[in-house]
Image (tube, rainbow, N blue to C red):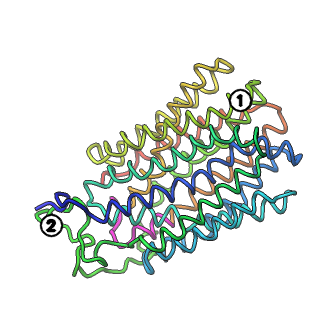
Amino acid sequence: MVEENRTFHWAWVILGICFGILFINYSVRLGYGVVMPEMIRTLGFSRAASGTIYNSYLFVYITITPFTGYLTDRLGARRVITVCLLILGLGTFLMGTAEDLWKASLFFALTGLGASGIWTPVLTIVQRWFAHHRRGFAMGLVATGYGIGFATMGVVFPWIVANFDWRYAWFFLGGMAFVMVLVSGIFLRSDPAGSGLKPWGHRDSSGSNDNIPGTEKKHVPLTAILRNHQFWIIGGSYFAITYSCYGITTFMVDYAKYQLGMPLEKAAFLATIHGIGQIIGVLTILPLSDYLGRRKTTIISNAFIAVSLIGILACGDMWGLLYGFIGCLGIFSGVTFPIYGLCAGDYFPQEAIGTVIGAWTPFYGSGAIIAHWVTGILRDKTGVYDQAFMIFIITGAIGVLLMCLVRKS
C-alpha cells in the first residue's frame, strides 16, 4: 500500500509553509543584488562596501548554520524555523533604517542570523516528510519559492523606487517574515513520526524505516561524517559552484546598469528572468534527479552554469542574448542549492541530514563571501566586471570536475 493514495496528507501543508518561508528568505537574500545599486547610490557606498554588507550576513550565516543544523536534528525543525524567522524579520525591517555602512552591516548580519535557521531546517523537514523516491519532486515544488521571490523582486523593486524608495523593499519583506512566524509556529510539524504518520509516498514493501512511527532513531556523530571523504569532495564542489552563482547573481543588475548602460527597469528585469529560470529548473530538473541520480544531475547542472557564464561574458551588450543566458543560468543555478542538500540524504544516514547540510554551509558561505569581496574589489580597481566574470567561469568548471570524483550513492 502506498500512503500517497490518501485523500489528504499533512506533508502538503508542510510543503506549502516551506514554500512561503523560502519565498521570503530568498527575496531578502537574492533581492539584495536588486536593491544594492540604488542603495549604494543614495548612501554613497563603493562596490567593495556593498560586498562587505552582504558578507556580514554571510559571516554570521556560515558561523551559526552548522549549529542550527545540529539543533534541527535534536530539537526539531519547527522550533528552529519559528525563532529564526522572527530574527530574520527584525533584521530585514531594520535594513530599511540603515544610514551608514556599519549599521547596514550590523542589520544584515542580524538578518543572516535569522536566515541560518531557514534553509537547513526546510531541506531537512521536506526530506523527512517525503519518501526517498519523492524528494526531488517535493523539493522541486517547494524550491519554486525562492525563484518566485527573486523574480518578484525584479518586477516590484523598480515600482517601489518610483513610488517610495529602496527602504520600503526591506519594510515590506520584514513584515511578511513576521506573518510567517505565526504560521510556522502553529502549523509546522518537524517529522511525520511525531504525528503518527509515514512519509508521503512511502511504500510498505520498500524495507525503509525512515521516519516511520515506532522506528528507533540512532545518533550519528559529527566526527563520523567528517571522516567520510565524500563529504569533503561534495563540499569542495559546493564551494566552487556557489562562488560562480553568487558572484553573478549579486552583481548582474549593477553590471547591466553601469557597465552595459541599461536603464534600471531593464537591468532589474534580469532578476525576474533569473527567477523564472529558477522556477523552471526546480520544477523539471529536481524531479528528474529522482531518476538520473543526484551525482549525474549535479554534474550536468554545473556544466550548464559554466557554459552560461561564458555566454554572459561573451555577448556583451546584446541584450536579447544576455537575457537568454541569464535565463539558462537561472534554470540550473536554481537547482544548485537543493540538489546539494538532497545529496545529504543520499550519501549519509537520515538521522544526520540536518547536521550534514549544516556542516556543508561553510563551503557555501565562504564561496559567496570570497566572490563578493573579489568581485567588488576587481570592479572598483578596473572599472569593469570582465576579470571577475572569468573567475566565475573557472570556478564553475571546478564544480563540475569535483562532482565527477564522487562515487555513486
Q: Which of the 4 image quadrants contains residue 99?
A: bottom right
Rendered-image quadrant of the N terminus: bottom left
Report the mark closest to the observer, 1 or 2.
1
Residue at point 39% right, 71% down?
A: 352
Rendered-image quadrant of the C terminus: bottom left
Above or below, 396 relative to 12: above
Above or below, 184 relative to 393: below
- Disc 2 marks which amino acid? Gly
Q: Which residue is mark 2?
A: 207
- Disc 1 marks which amino acid? Ala
Instruction: Point out the stretch of residues depicted in magenta.
Output: 345-358
Residue at point 45% right, 45% down?
A: 335
Looking at the image, residue 138 sits to the left or right of residue 276; the answer is left
At which x and y percent is residue 364? 57, 55
Mark seen at residue 396 = none
Q: CA distance from mark 1 to mark 2?
A: 53 Å
Earlier along the polypeptide chain: callout 1 or callout 2?
A: 2
Above or below, 100 relative to 90: above
Residue at point 46% right, 70% down?
A: 355
Front residue of 264/236: it is 264
Q: Which residue is mark 1?
A: 256
Q: Which of the 4 image quadrants contains residue 230?
A: bottom left
* SS assignment at label 1: helix
| Secondary structure, magenta segment, majority class | helix
Above or below, 192 relative to 127: below
Looking at the image, residue 126 sits to the left or right of residue 153; the answer is left
Is residue 343 a member of the stretch shown in magenta? Answer: no
